[in-house]
């Protein structure tokens, strides 16, 4: 399986591959909840985004690397929640200025939905 991992990691834009021997670093295995080997964990921004446990073929390994690379490229920035919250707040201000109750309700929904999606994204 290691040759397949090395091949997938050598592709352009692939995530960096770090190999850890859990028999010589049991604290690393414990810290990441590794119960069986082989285990492949994909991280983006320090957070786990995907995991493979057990022996996998080359196709599944390449799909895993592609998925982690895609998440790395499309990781939301701090601008995303600011834009969502700001948009909801702006709609709320317009609703207050025009005494339009439907706009106020819509603004509240936008802000609450934004807060919920941000909370879920940070929670993992």
Image (cartoon, rainbow, N blue to C red):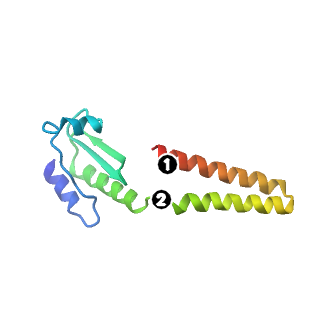
Residue 76 tag number: 2
At horizontal 20% and vertical 37% (from top left) the residue drawn is 37
At horizontal 19% and vertical 53% (from top left) the residue drawn is 5
11 sits to left or right of 82: left
39 sits to left or right of 75: left
At horizontal 86% and vertical 58% (from top left) the residue drawn is 99
Please identify the residue farthest to the top as the structure is shown.
35
Tell me the quarter of the picture where residue 56 sits.
Answer: top left
Lower position in the chain sequence, tag 2 or tag 1: 2
Tell me the quarter of the picture where residue 40 sits.
Answer: top left
Please identify the residue farthest to the bottom as the structure is shown.
12
Relative depth, front residue between 104 and 10: 104
81 sits to left or right of 23: right
Are the residues flagged by discs 2 and 1 in contact, CB closer than 8 Å? yes
Residue 36 percent location from the top left of the image: 23, 34
Relative depth, front residue between 24 and 64: 24
Residue 51 percent location from the top left of the image: 32, 44
Q: Check the image and report above or below for 60 versus 88.
A: above
Crowding at mark 1 (Cα within 10 Å: few <14, some 14-19, many 20+) = few
Q: CA distance from mark 2 to mark 1?
A: 9 Å
Tell me the quarter of the picture where residue 80 sits.
Answer: bottom right
Relative depth, front residue between 99 and 70: 99
Crowding at mark 2 (Cα within 10 Å: few <14, some 14-19, many 20+) = few
Residue 121 tag number: 1
Q: Secondary structure at mark 2?
A: loop
At horizontal 39% and vertical 57% (from top left) the residue drawn is 71
Residue 103 percent location from the top left of the image: 78, 57
């Amino acid at each position: 399986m290691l040759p397949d991992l090395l091949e997938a990691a050598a592709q352009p834009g692939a995530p960096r591959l770090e190999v850890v021997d859990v028999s010589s670093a049991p604290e690393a295995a414990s810290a990441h909840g590794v119960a069986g080997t082989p285990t492949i964990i994909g991280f983006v921004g320090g957070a786990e985004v995907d995991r493979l446990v057990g022996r996998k073929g080359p196709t599944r390994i390449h799909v895993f690397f592609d998925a982690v690379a895609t998440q790395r490229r499309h990781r939301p920035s701090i601008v995303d929640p600011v834009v969502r919250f700001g948009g909801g707040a702006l709609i709320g201000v317009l609703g207050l200025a025009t005494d339009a109750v439907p706009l106020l309700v819509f603004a509240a929904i936008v802000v609450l939905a934004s807060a919920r999606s941000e909370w879920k994204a940070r929670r993992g």
